Image (tube, helix red, strand yellow):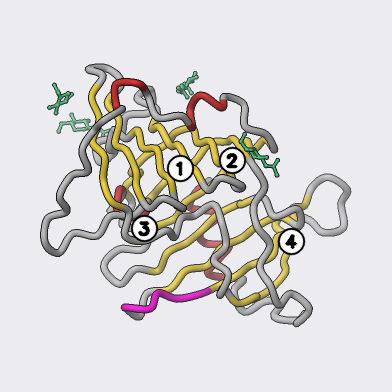
Amino acid sequence: MLAAVTLFMFVCFTATTNADHHHHPCHTPNITGLMAVMSLKGEVKACGAFTYDSTGKKLRFRSNESHPVNSSIGLDILMFFDEGIFYEIDSKNQSCEKKKLHCTMHPLDIPDDAKFYASMTTGSASIEGEGLKVNVWTGGFTDSKDHYSMSVTMGCLPVSTLYFFEATPFLFSIMEVEMEIKDPDLLVVPSYCHGQPLEETPEGTINSFLHEFI
Ligand SMILES: *[C@@H]1O[C@H](CO)[C@@H](O)[C@H](O)[C@H]1NC(C)=O
Ligand SMILES: *[C@@H]1O[C@H](CO)[C@@H](O)[C@H](O)[C@H]1NC(C)=O
Ligand SMILES: *[C@@H]1O[C@H](CO)[C@@H](O)[C@H](O)[C@H]1NC(C)=O
Ligand SMILES: *[C@@H]1O[C@H](CO)[C@@H](O)[C@H](O)[C@H]1NC(C)=O
């Protein structure tokens, strides 16, 4: 399924660059859902559940250990984009690391400076219930030639985000989205993380949601 989505994005990119009425990207509402992260070298990096508070700019992602793949990584992260910090949590041995966030870009929300690319329908536009209409937004990174492409539904629910990193492109697929925060506790720093000192960032390291998978 992931491969199909990717192929679709590549093949159809030149399809319908029509409307110019979408000047400003929409913003994702509060959502809960599943996320699959795949490098386009063919590695599934992680599959798991996320909770996103779009008002408070908080994101929790926990990879599901029932979906182990050889290249997958066990991850439990809680990010506070406004504060510029995040926690890497290990709930099994109740430990955590608190780190500085250097880049707030993530695959669930369209950056404000993204450019509208196109509207298109996956599946069928003419058969009721068999199509999904998406808006595609694109943008770049200030410090490199890398760029991204994000697809969202008409209601601004994220569908997929493709990061065209020169080294390895990454695809984030979003599924089973619900427009609510089902478990608000997931966005609260666990008590065993309280008082955790901020880790020093090693020279040359960049911390961001994306970098957790690279
Ligand atoms: C999103 O969730 C947060 C935390 O539960 C809440 O404070 C905020 O009002 C919600 N935003 C919307 C638009 O519902
Ligand atoms: C992990 O995946 C399994 C199988 O798909 C599912 O039953 C389970 O609820 C998932 N666990 C979490 C924490 O998402
Ligand atoms: C993962 O690697 C092990 C040994 O390196 C191998 O036996 C196993 O088949 C691999 N599993 C998958 C899903 O690739
Ligand atoms: C917790 O467990 C992980 C591996 O499961 C280990 O790397 C880490 O050092 C442990 N932390 C503590 C404080 O024991």
Q: Main secondary structure of the magenta part?
A: loop
Which residue carries the number 2 mark?
175
Q: CA distance from mark 2 to mark 3?
A: 19 Å
Q: Along the polypeptide, which appears first: circle 2 or circle 3?
A: 3
Disc 2 is placed on an element classified as: strand
Question: In front of the other: label 2 or label 3?
Answer: 2
Marks 4 and 3, how far apart at CA: 23 Å
The part of the image, by quadrant, that contains residue 142 is bottom left
Other-residue count near label 4 (Cα within 10 Å), few / some / many at <14 / 14–19 / ≥20 = some
Ligand 1 has an atom within 8 Å of the beta carbon of the residue at disc 4: no
- Which is more N-terminal, label 2 or label 1? 1
4 and 3 marks in contact (CB < 8 Å): no
Q: Residues within 10 Å of mark 2 (few under 14, many from 20)?
A: some
User: Circle 3: is it few (<14), some (14-19), or many (20+) Cα within 10 Å?
Assistant: some
Label 3–label 1 contact, CB within 8 A? no
Q: Quadrant of residue 75?
A: top left
Asked whether disc 2 touches disc 3, contact meaning CB atoms under 8 Å apart, the reply is no
Coordinates of residue 1 in the picture (x, y in percent): 53, 45
Q: Nearer the viewer, residue 154 or 76?
A: 76
Q: Could you tell me which quadrant the C terminus lies in?
A: bottom left
Residues at marks 1 and 2 touching, judged by CB atoms closer than 8 Å: yes
State the mark number for residue 36. 1
> Which label belongs to residue 121?
4
| Residue placed most toward the observer, 148 or 82 | 82
Picture residue at 22% right of the left edge, 43% below the top: 198
Picture residue at 51% right of the left edge, 58% below the top: 161
- Residue 130 drawn in magenta: no
What's drawn in magenta, residue-wise?
139-143
